[in-house]
Amino acid sequence: MSLSKELKQKIYAGGSVTRDEALALADEPLDDLTAAADEIREKMCGNRFDMCTIVNGKCGRCPEDCKYCAQSVHYHTACQDTYPLLATEVLLEGARRNQEQGVLRYSIVTSGKRLSDAEVEQVCGSIREIRRQIGIEVCVSFGFLDEEQFRKIKAAGASRVHCNLETSRNYFPQVCTTHTYDEKVAVLRAAKSAGLSICSGGIMGLGETMEDRIDMALALRDLGVKSVPVNLLNPIKGTPYERNRILSNDELCRIVAVFRFIIPDGDIRLAGGRGLVGDKGAKCFKSGANAAISGDMLTTAGVTVATDMALVEGLGYEVSLEKI
């Protein structure tokens, strides 16, 4: 029996993949690995597909030095736009447009290290109106907030907080120096303590190893994360990563498949950079992935919702929320 099949049976029996097993799994023949991952996905999650969209709710020259980011003040990129928190009416329009296209989650993402208390109050008002008028699920990514602020956001009607770990603890200092990995972990723990679900993943192609990717996925599992965005680095001109090699579709499928083994009942979510692979993620959606961020990303173009709906339905998925 191949290692892929052996570990699949271990998962079916209620076991968990160890670090050493995940490292060995990453060297399995790709077809065997992805087929087993897709079978795990179907058994653990059925054919449910979780689709969300994001809106750049506050754009602007961020003081953090994340080496991949077009919005950082530390780099000279084409993204020079700045604007404060979007008005409630603008966020409502976006939420309504997405709901009409069949999207079930709408995520508000803001630049900067954290929102101020006044900004939290403002956006809570927007969240309340979105929930009251439209009803779409609202997710947020507001930086390094504390548990009290997250409780206000939950009371306003948000259901999920997003904060990417980005990479492993070991590699993180190579990616960012203005905040720490532990600060990100603290955000996820505070959001979870406030009663919100948590979403966290990373960017593939920063120069990290497969070991780094596996260590990140294991950390997410330990934190209880069930929504795992897998971003493919889109090398932005002007950032330190502008010359990084873009990972191949097969490499991305291998990562997705290993993540499915590590978090078998989660939503492995293709996110930024998906448009860089020729099939828009179709092969990954048969390799263990069962979720996506659709539409445009924060500063780059994505895959349209209409295109995604046709794609996932053609693969036999049904766009729906997880059963709680």
Image (cartoon, rainbow, N blue to C red):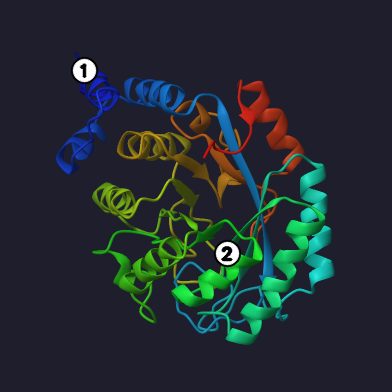
> What residue is drawn where x is 33% and y is 36%?
258
The tag on residue 15 is none
Residue 221 percent coordinates (x, y) = 32, 48
Residue 35 percent coordinates (x, y) = 39, 20
Residue 255 lies, with reference to residue 206, above or below; the image says above
Residue 95 percent coordinates (x, y) = 77, 55
Disc 2 crowd, CA 10 A, few/some/many (<14, 14-19, 20+) = many
Residue 96 percent coordinates (x, y) = 82, 52
As measured in the structure, the alpha-carbon distance from the residue carrying label 1 to the one carrying label 2 is: 45 Å
Is residue 138 at least partly visible in the picture?
yes
Report the residue marked by disc 1.
Answer: 2
Q: Quadrant of residue 188?
A: bottom left
Closer to the camera in the image, 16 or 302: 16
Closer to the camera in the image, 316 or 240: 316
Amino acid of disc 1: Ser
Disc 1 crowd, CA 10 A, few/some/many (<14, 14-19, 20+) = few
Given this view, does label 1 or label 2 mark the residue nearer the observer? 2
Report the residue marked by disc 2.
Answer: 154
> Given the current orientation, which residue lies at the most extreme front position?
155
Amino acid of disc 2: Lys
